[in-house]
Image: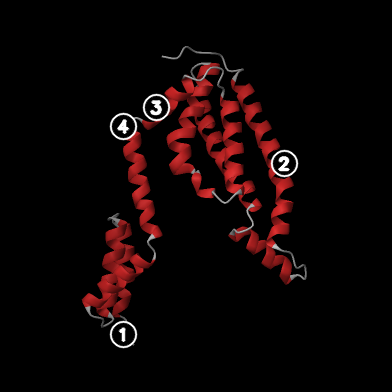
Amino acid sequence: MNYWPLVGIAIVVGGFALRFNPLLVVVAAALATGVLAGLDLVAVIQALGSAFNDNRYISVTWIILPVIGLLERYGLQQRARAVIESVRGATMGKLLVIYLLFRQITAAIGMKDIGGHPQTVRPLVAPMAEAAAEMSHGELPEDKRQKVLAMAAATDNVGLFFGEDIFFAIASILLIQGVFESYGYPLTPLQLSVWAIPTAICAFIIHGWRITAFDRRLGRIPRRAVT
């Protein structure tokens, strides 16, 4: 038995322990494993390229994140704050309740990727919620500011989680259908989607109440002038 291909494992362990670039470590380990297993170097590189090409959705992440980072560098968050500051009567509670409704509706019709933490919450929703809270309650202590940002992220989670099950052509509905069918309860995806609507409504009411209650608690913080 040829144990030399196991050198790839040692490369991974050593590279991560020395905190080298993870991508370079994984590629080096793959090349070493293939060559030591007796494969031609060109064939190993071809296999890596084919795997990457067959899973192109991985590259989408590496395209989106730099784009968002570039937009933030040129003032996307500041623009988002400016927009909400120009809206008369805007509050953090109203903003997040509206976003919760938007997130649930879009997820319910299958548009679950229209929002999300990296592409929506961090660059847009979170700074807008923070600006709205400061407009209503003045400058926030750091711990309260972090809670505002966390509430923005939680709102996205709740909206997506309880909205996507209304869309019958989604993996979670098919999983639930399979579990029920294995226990002798044949249900169609449409039936499961219909019964997800009351849950989504309850989630909207409960989390909407949590948002407005949190906004009221912020109002009890002693106001400080915004510098």
Relative image position of residue 55 (x, y in whole percent):
39, 64
Q: Is residue 11 above or below residue 112?
A: below
Q: Which type of secondary structure does the marked residue at label 1 adopt? A: loop
Of pointers 4 and 2, the one earlier in the residue sequence: 4
Q: Which type of secondary structure does the marked residue at label 2 adopt? A: helix
Residue under the image location 29 percent in, 67 percent down = 11
Q: Give the amino acid type for the residue marked by disc 2 in the picture.
A: Cys
Residue under the image location 32 percent in, 58 percent down = 16
Of pointers 1 and 4, the one earlier in the residue sequence: 1
Of pointers 2 and 1, the one earlier in the residue sequence: 1
User: Alpha-carbon neighbours of circle 3 within 10 Å: few (<14), some, or many (≥20)?
Assistant: some
Identify the residue under disc 2.
202
Towards the viewer: 154 or 176: 176
Task: Identify the image quadrant of residue 168.
Answer: bottom right
Q: Which type of secondary structure does the marked residue at label 4 adopt? A: loop
Identify the residue under disc 1.
2
User: Alpha-carbon neighbours of circle 1 within 10 Å: few (<14), some, or many (≥20)?
Assistant: few
Of pointers 2 and 3, the one earlier in the residue sequence: 3
Q: Are marks 4 and 2 in contact (CB under 8 Å)?
A: no
Q: CA distance from mark 2 to mark 3?
A: 34 Å
Towards the viewer: 207 or 90: 90
Identify the residue under disc 4.
74
User: Alpha-carbon neighbours of circle 2 within 10 Å: few (<14), some, or many (≥20)?
Assistant: few
Towards the viewer: 69 or 111: 111
Q: CA distance from mark 1 to mark 4?
A: 54 Å
Q: Give the amino acid type for the residue marked by disc 3 in the picture.
A: Arg
Residue under the image location 73 percent in, 58 percent down = 191
Q: Give the amino acid type for the residue marked by disc 1 in the picture.
A: Asn
Q: Is residue 134 above or below residue 80?
A: above
